[in-house]
Amino acid sequence: LGHDDATIIFVLGGPGAGKGTQCARMVEEYGFKHLSAGDLLREEQDREGSQYGDMIKQYIKDGEIVPMEVTIKLIENKIVDVIKTDKGAKFLIDGFPRKMDQALKFEEVVCPSVFTLFFDCPEDTMQERLLNRGKTSGRADDNAESIKKRFKTFVETSMPVVDYFEKQGKVVKISAVPPPEEVYEEVKRQLVERGV
Ligand code: UP5
Ligand code: MG
């Protein structure tokens, strides 16, 4: 696929930075299609008859990155499905790519991204948000032990992806510390500036 078929924006940031929260707002105002890699993996994990269910469950609990073949396929299937009836649709790919191999493979075999929105947030803020959400989220990885592992994976494995796109001048960095409305105002400014 090329830029005519789909506009791909990657949405990255540490665990609990607020990627999902900001994507929801962009969907509402700009009609983006929101594909959260984590949500797609959790959906696949719970799908009756999935051969990957147990594996995904273990990876998520340990805050590790599920082998890229699985995740890329899930995202690709959704994109292909959407553009059948909506050629040129704009996608927010949330929480992906978070490992170099995924980044290279996705842009090679599925579609190149136009840029990456990177939500920058200190760890203590993210931890507080996740522990707070964990009281009600039911997510298997919103506990202190999993959160620690997710942070480690983010620093060691996912930040290199942000750095890689940064070197190509394709990263839009936004502070995720202010309240959601304020973060969103900055998101909008950046989208307008880029004509999306
Ligand atoms: N909140 C949000 N914004 C706020 C703000 N500005 N001020 C105050 N509070 C704010 O927000 C988190 C919480 O913070 C919420 O309670 C929210 O109200 C509040 P949310 O928008 O959910 O943050 P988000 O960045 O989306 O956090 P999430 O937990 O979803 O991030 P992760 O990246 O950790 O989770 P994801 O679902 O993407 O991945 C989960 C796991 O799946 C990974 O650890 C990995 O094991 C696996 N995975 C892969 O293997 N491969 C992939 O490609 C992707 C995922
Ligand atoms: Mg999320």
Image: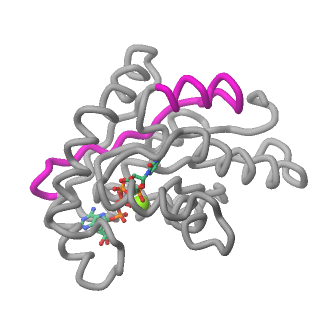
Q: Residue furthest left?
A: 124
Q: Position of residue 36 (x, y in %)?
A: 53, 56
Q: Where is residue 121 in the image (x, y as percent from the top left)?
A: 21, 48
Q: Which residue lies furthest to the bottom in this view?
A: 136
User: What residue is rendered at 21% in x and 51% in y?
Assistant: 149
User: What residue is rendered at 48% in x and 38% in y?
Assistant: 97
Up-down relation of residue 137 to residue 107 (above or below): below
Count the numbered circles shown: 0
Drawn side of residue 10 relative to residue 195, left or right: left
Magenta part of the protein: which range?
A: 101-125
Drawn side of residue 125 relative to residue 39, left or right: left
Closer-to-camera residue (139/112): 139
**Is residue 120 a member of the stretch shown in magenta?**
yes
Up-down relation of residue 19 to residue 43 (above or below): above
Image quarter where the C terminus lies is: top right
Closer-to-camera residue (21/101): 101
User: What residue is rendered at 23% in x and 36% in y?
Assistant: 155
